[in-house]
Image (cartoon, rainbow, N blue to C red):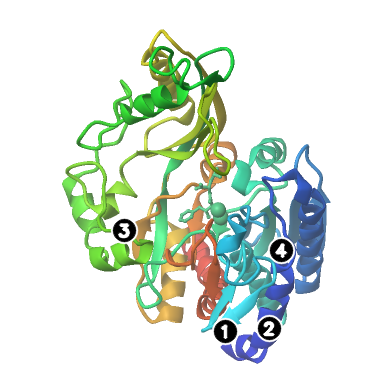
Amino acid sequence: MKDFTGYINANRQRFIDELLDFLRIPSVSADSKYKKDVEHAAEWVKKSLLAAGTDKAEIIPTSMHPIVYAEKIIDPKLPTVLAYGHYDVQPPDPLNLWKSPPFEPVIKDGKIYARGSCDDKGQVYMHVKALEVMMKNGGPPCNVKFLIEGEEEVGSVSLGDFVKKNRKKLEADIILISDTEIIANDVPSITVGLRGLTYVEVEVTGPGRDLHSGVYGGAVPNPINILCDMINSLKDKNGHITIPGFYKDVRVVPAKERKELNKAPFSLKKYKSEVGIEDVTGEKGYTTLERTAIRPSLDVNGIWGGYTGEGSKTVIASKAYAKISMRLVPNQDSGKMTALFTKHFKKIAPPSVKVKVTPFHGGEPVLLETNSAGYRAASEAMNTSFGKKPIPTRGGGSIPIVALFKKELGLDSVMLGFGLNSDNIHSPNEHYGVFNYMKGIETITLFYSNFAREVSKVKS
Ligand code: BES
Ligand code: MN
Ligand code: MN
C-alpha cells in the first residue's frame, strides 16, 4: 500500500497556511450582508480544487448561495467517491465572547481558532488536500467528485433541488463526508447515525397594541407569560415531550444496541465541566449518550418580545416569539412532526391569545450500516492512521442532505469526521486541532485505497 505520510509531513505548513486563508473569508450563509463573502468563498474553493488536480470545477449559482462541483475522472470503470461538505459557516455572534476575532485565524496550543475551522471548512479542506496528496503520488485509485455547498447551515434547500435535477452528474458509489466528530483523539469513531430536525417559529399575540403594565396589568393576557406557560407544558416532569403522537414512529432501539452504545468511553464529570453545568437533564430512563443519539429532543433556540433594552420599561407587549427546534430520530418524519407540533401548539393556546406557527427548514434522521464496503474502508483507514479500530457512534446533530442523497441518488454516506465535541462549533472560540486536520488528510487518502479494494472484492 502507498505511504503518503512523507508527502503530507513535508507539506504540513503549506496545508495549514492555505486553510488559514480559507478561514479568513467570512462566509456566513444566514446573514445576507455576507453574500459577497459567501460568493468569494465558493470561488476560493473552486480554485483550490483545480489547483489540487480536478479536471474541471464549476460554480453553480442558485437562488441563494452557489454550489461548487468538481471532478477528477480517472477511468469510468473505477468506483467513484463523491465528497460532500459545506463552505458556509454559522454567524460568529456573540462577538464579544471571542478571544481572537472569528475571521482572523490564530493557532494556539496546536488548535486553529476561527469560525468554520472545524465546521466545516477545516474538514472540507482535508478532502481538497487529500486529492492533492494522491495526485502528486501516482493518482487516486477511484474517480473523485466534489460537491461543496454554501447553505448547509441554513437547511441545504438549493442543494436539495440540485441533487434532484442532476442524478446523472452525481452518479457515484459512495458519499464521503467529514462534518461530524470523533469521541477523542485517542478514541477514534465513525458516525453511523444523525438526528433529523424540525424547526419552527411561533408568534403569540395578546392585546392589539403594547399596554401600560400598571394600567392593564392583572386584567389582560400577557403573551410573553402565556408563551412561557405553553413552552413549559411541552415537556412533562420526566422530560417526555407531550405532543400527542410525537413518539409514535420512534424506532424502539433493542437492548443490545443500547448496551453497545453505552460502552463508548464517556465521563459524566468531564462532560459537565466542559459545558459548564452543575447537572445534566433529560428524558427519564435514558443515559446522556442515549439522550443525544437515539432519543428525540425539543429546545427553545431563542425567545423575545417586550422591552429588552437598558433599564426598565413598564409594558405588556402585544406579541411574543420563540424559535423552537425538535431533533428527530428514526423513523420520525420531519414534515409529520411539524404538523403535529403546529396542531398541538394551537390547541394548548388559551382563548385569550392568537397563535401563529411558521415552519422553517427540516431534515430527516439517518441510520447507516456498518457492514458495507464504505464503512469497512473507513474503519480500516482509521485503524491504520490512529492505530486503533474506530467505534461506530451516533451523532446528535443533523446534516439534512444525507437522507436526501439516499432517497434521490440511492447512495449511502460514510461520515468520516474528525472534530471533537469540545471544538465549540456554532459557539464562540470555535477551533480545530492541527492534529485532527493532518490526521484527517491522511485517513482520507487511506480511505480511497481501501474503498477501491473493497469494491473490487465485492465485484470479483
Ligand atoms: N456539522 C454539523 C452537524 C453535526 C455536528 C453532526 C456534530 C454531528 C455532530 C452541521 O453543520 C450542522 O450544524 N447542522 C445543523 C443543521 C441545520 C442547520 C439544518 C444542525 O445540526 O443544527
Ligand atoms: Mn457542518
Ligand atoms: Mn454546523
Q: Using the numbered discs, state the Cα–Cα distance from disc 2 to disc 1 in whole angstroms.
A: 8 Å
Name the residue carrying label 2.
137
Name the residue carrying label 3.
277
Q: Are marks 4 and 3 in contact (CB under 8 Å)?
A: no
Give the amino acid at mark 1: Lys
Horizontal side, residue 118 vs residue 73: left or right:
left
Q: Select label 2 or label 4 by which is in front.
A: 2
Q: Which of the two discs, 4 and 1, labels the residue nearer the N terminus?
A: 1
Q: Which of the two discs, 3 and 2, labels the residue nearer the N terminus?
A: 2
Q: Using the numbered discs, state the Cα–Cα distance from disc 2 to disc 4 in whole angstroms.
A: 17 Å
Residue 347 versus residue 38: which sits nearer the camera? 347
Q: Using the numbered discs, state the Cα–Cα distance from disc 3 to disc 1 in whole angstroms.
A: 47 Å
Name the residue carrying label 1.
2
Mark 4: few/some/many CA within 10 Å (<14, 14-19, 20+): few
Horizontal side, residue 37 vs residue 150: left or right:
right
Q: Residue at x 55, y 65 (%)?
A: 430
Q: Using the numbered discs, state the Cα–Cα distance from disc 4 to disc 1 in whole angstroms.
A: 20 Å
Residue 341 versus residue 399: which sits nearer the camera? 341
Q: Are marks 2 and 4 in contact (CB under 8 Å)?
A: no
Give the amino acid at mark 2: Asn
Q: Report if the beta carbon of the residue with label 2 is closer than 8 angstroms to ligand 2.
A: no
Q: Which of the two discs, 4 and 3, labels the residue nearer the N terminus?
A: 4
Name the residue carrying label 4.
75
Give the amino acid at mark 4: Asp
